[in-house]
Image: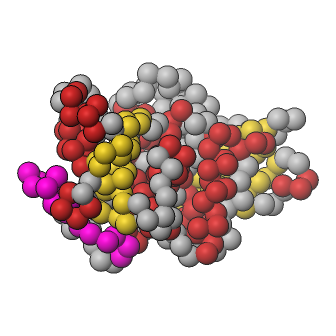
Amino acid sequence: MKAIQFKTFGSPEVLEYVDLPTPQADADNVVVQVKAASVNPSDVKNVSGHFEHTVLPRTPGRDFSGVVADGPQQWLGAEVWGTGGDIGFTRDGTHAGFIKIPLGALSRKPATLSHAETSAIGVNFVVAWLGTVEYARLQAGESIAVIGAGGGVGGAVVQIAKARGARVIAVDRHPLSADSPAGRLIDDYVPFDEHVTERVKALTGGADVVYDTVGGVAFETALSLAKRRGRVLEISGTGKRRVEFDLIDFYHNETQLLGVDSAKLGVAESAPLMTALVEGFESGKLQAPAIAQQFTLERARDAYEAVAAGTRGRVVITMQ
């Protein structure tokens, strides 16, 4: 099969378009023919050597959509999708013609979406669901402030929160496009500037949940947006990994601070979350993110370069 592989860490130039043996199913694992796979910023970071646990040589790629090609009879031909913090890191990933995954990782994709669309959902929506639903337990009628609402994870949080009946406040340096799924759903937009705290508190008195997709330089601001006993979710450390904050204000406010790391979820552990998302996409409550560019597997380097350059919208590799 054709695949992308890297044997050393570096820029997308280290990616090689190679022939590898097609994996075979066994008692515990199935083989999926990959139809489409997105490229995430974490995939670019993986190739650059950002993650210490990556084992070389490696085929990268976390998200996929495809068809079961080898495995139990009841699954043969089924259209499936998935993501995981292990595939592309400690086991070969999705930027290949076929991928071998545990039987427990199988999740039927939304029937209403194309393979390209479903391949662009995984990482962003899993970490959004994990924080918003599993950890913060956002309820209908509550308010949520989403820092970085214009990004991939932020946009997914906006959609999930709105589908759960929450009031959504988008906090970003720039207004969200009215044509984007997230831009059509937000209740309020607040610029991320020196007045963000007073503006959010004027709207809500403090948000029940703050989902901070930026972290680092935005961390203290995130804490300041939470109401008493509010929940603050952190997934990143942009700009700096060590932060300072007023501990007395923190404990007086009884703030709950939660870290969210979808990379800890392997492809099998992610499958129940993918399955939980299906109804939302099939019912229309959730919308697939916009695909900005599509590339063939042979042009995977170009796909990685596009993500590294900060292309807005999702970048997808489609298999021939």
Q: Is 197 included in the stretch rendered in magenta?
A: yes
Q: Which quadrant: the C terminus?
A: bottom right
Relative height, residue 167 to residue 23 (above, below): below
Q: Can you say whether 12 is above or below 177 in the image? A: above
Q: In the rendered image, is residue 218 in sight? A: no
**How many labels sit on residues?**
0
Q: Nearer the viewer, residue 265 or 2?
A: 265
Residue at the spot 54% in from the left edge and 32% down from the top edge:
264
Q: Quadrant of the N terminus?
A: top right
Q: Residue at x 38, y 73 (%)?
A: 185
Q: Is residue 80 left or right of residue 184?
A: right
- Residue located 36% across and 43% down the image: 229
Q: Is 109 or 295 nearer to us in this picture?
A: 109
Residue positioned most to the left:
194
Q: Is residue 10 left or right of residue 128?
A: left
> Is 215 in front, or is 83?
215
Measuring from the top left, give residue 181's x and y in whole percent.
40, 72
Q: Position of residue 76 (x, y in %)?
A: 84, 56
Colour mode? secondary structure
Residue 84 horizontal/vertical position (percent) = 58, 41
Is 136 covered by the magenta stretch? no
Q: Is residue 174 visible?
A: yes
Figure quadrant of residue 92: top right
Q: Nearer the viewer, residue 115 or 109?
A: 109
In the displayed structure, would residue 159 be above or below residue 27?
A: below
Left or right: where 192 falls relative to 34: left
Q: Position of residue 250 (x, y in %)?
A: 26, 33
Q: Which residues are magenta?
A: 184-200
Residue drawn where x is 64% and y is 67% of the image? 279
